Image (cartoon, coloured by chain):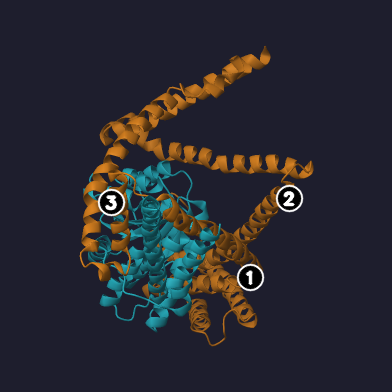
Chain colours: A orange, B cyan
Amino acid sequence: MVTNHTTDTRAKLVRIFTFLGGIYFFLYFVLPESAVTVIGMKAHHEQISNGFIVIGAMALGLGLYNIMRAHGARVVFQRPGWFNSLALLVGLFAMIAATSAQWIENVRNAKDIRRVQVLGEFATRIVEDARTQPTGRTVPPVAERVAALVRYGDETTALIEAHTNLSVQAGTNGAASLLVMEVRERIANTRGKLVDCKGSAWERPSDEDLSRLTQFSQDAAKLASSYSILKRSHDAHSLSQKVYDFLFDGLFNQLGSAMFALLGVYIAAAAYRAFRVRTIESGLMMTAAVIVMLGQISFGKEIYEHVPSIRQWLLEVPNSAAFRAIRLGAGVAGLMLAIRMWLSIESRSFSSGRK
Amino acid sequence: MGGRRLIYLLMILAVGLPIVCGISQKPSRLVSAERMYDVVEQVKVEPGEVAMIWLDFGPNTVAENEPQTQVLVEHLFRRRIPVVLLSQYQQAERFLTKIPNEVAKRLEAEMPGQQWRYGEAWVNAGFRPGGAIFIQSMVNAADVSKFLGRDVNGMPISYYPTFSAIGGVERVKIVGEITGLIGVFDNIIQFFQKNGYRPTIVHGCTSITIPEAYIFLDSGQLKGLLEGIAGAAWYSVVLKEHFPRSENKELLVTNTALSAAHIVLILLIVLGNLVPLFARRRANHG
């Protein structure tokens, strides 16, 4: 009884949300922009859409759970085909591990690169605040901020230098490579500007001091750009990247391509056995197919000069007309299906508890 | 059984020989690919404006879609149009980095001293779930860079100076959709637009979806089309005519191998019809 009541409530909730979701996107698409703005839909549309995207992304997690449940049970109880399920699960976890390792590495890199970018942004902010007194917030004196900038700059350039040396030692970037030389040159530039900053009196900064700080900010941005490329080229040789390359390029890509390539030989066998001209219609179809194939290949023109033009006509005129008719039919059918889903007429499974 | 083996052997030879021997023939002229070249060549891009290329393919159709992406990205890079790469299909994630990297390296080798760097020439916005809803939201966003958020490396896209202020979707001047899937191209055609804005859309499709793509080409919703490998091969020929140092020999060899396979297919169709016909006649005379 309780189960029936829960199922009923769930079914009602699903129907209500399906209806509301459907009507929301329908109205947003159909109403003029001015009306959407007046109602207030426009202001919240991005958040609402993001919510739907998140729900869609959750399906990936659900799929993962289902795979593990279905195939995990088969492996544990050694049901027929358990070995294939084991291969699937091993592949799944290997890929998750490799991708996660890469993701962690990327996040760490992004943090390091961001550190250099902050250096430039900090300098820009000091200049802006010194030129126009900030309203609504209190900032420390310029001298104090510049001292902090210099400290932070020294630490950051030391970090980049260490990473660059590491990259050279590991052999991922040659000491004489353009990139390494560029990074080292930019580190030297940035350090030079930091030394200049130390020498100025920041209690009352002059225009010249501030323009020097602006120059420093530009140099730091350039350093961040070069450093991000150096980091990425270094990581291209990391273990996690190599494992990922092996799994994706070495296995997944090759197996996927091989599966699809098998179609080629099947089509050839089918062409010989099944493509028989028995009626006028099948004769027309075969002629069209041969012309379209000939028009697309290198040798077609050698056989008959106008084959590509005839192919073009076939695709543009009879083919487009036929496909439009098919698409219109499919569109009307899709609309009907969408309305049925929107009104939950199609979703019998939600109320399956009340057979 | 023996007949089938012979057919398989013929196919392997037809595809394998041109690849092993490196034979390449000039591809067939495809008007749709030429139209695409003209569109990319003539599009006017102001600073801050970008091209957006969707790579919606996985290993299954990589043989056709990868060369299409290569020629399109090469052309955009040569024109110095900043490119945002992203995907509606999770299996494409790898190609979003690999292909532009390879093209950039090839161009840098061709033109020493020039660079096509990540974050300057292109950015990888990664896989984006949500399909049509995601596209609708992006189209309505005030700033595309902020809406996209972070790139595949976890860096905010707005930190890259070239992509820092894309602004509204009107600044996306050209949209490319390279796919072998059903439905993802429809999302672009249907939803990548808003009041007073319709981008220039170009498309690279697999041979199997060419007939469907033609209806959009005919209606003008699509400005250019790369039809399978043949389309990419002809595009590369047109590229070479304008940029003589552009090299895509591997693509031309693949296209020749595919052409040889098509010839075998046509011969098999003809044989498949003639053999039973002669057999029937002989039986009747007998």
Marker count (numbered) = 3
Q: Residues within 10 Å of mark 3 (few under 14, many from 20)?
A: many
Give the Cα separation between the discs numbered 2 and 3.
45 Å
Which element is circle 2 on? helix
| Residue that badge 3 annotates | B214
Residue shown at 48%/22% (left/top)?
A: A16
Horizontal and vertical percent position of residue B113: 39, 83
Kind of residue indicated by mark 3: Tyr
| Residue that badge 1 annotates | A238
Kind of residue indicated by mark 2: Phe
Specify the subunit that label 2 lies on: A
Specify the subunit that label 1 lies on: A
Horizontal and vertical percent position of residue A294: 30, 62
Which element is circle 1 on? loop
| Residue that badge 2 annotates | A83
Which element is circle 3 on? helix
User: Observer-nearest residue: B80 or A83?
Assistant: A83
Specify the subunit that label 3 lies on: B
Give the Cα separation between the discs numbered 2 and 1.
32 Å
Q: Quadrant of the C terminus of chain A?
A: top right
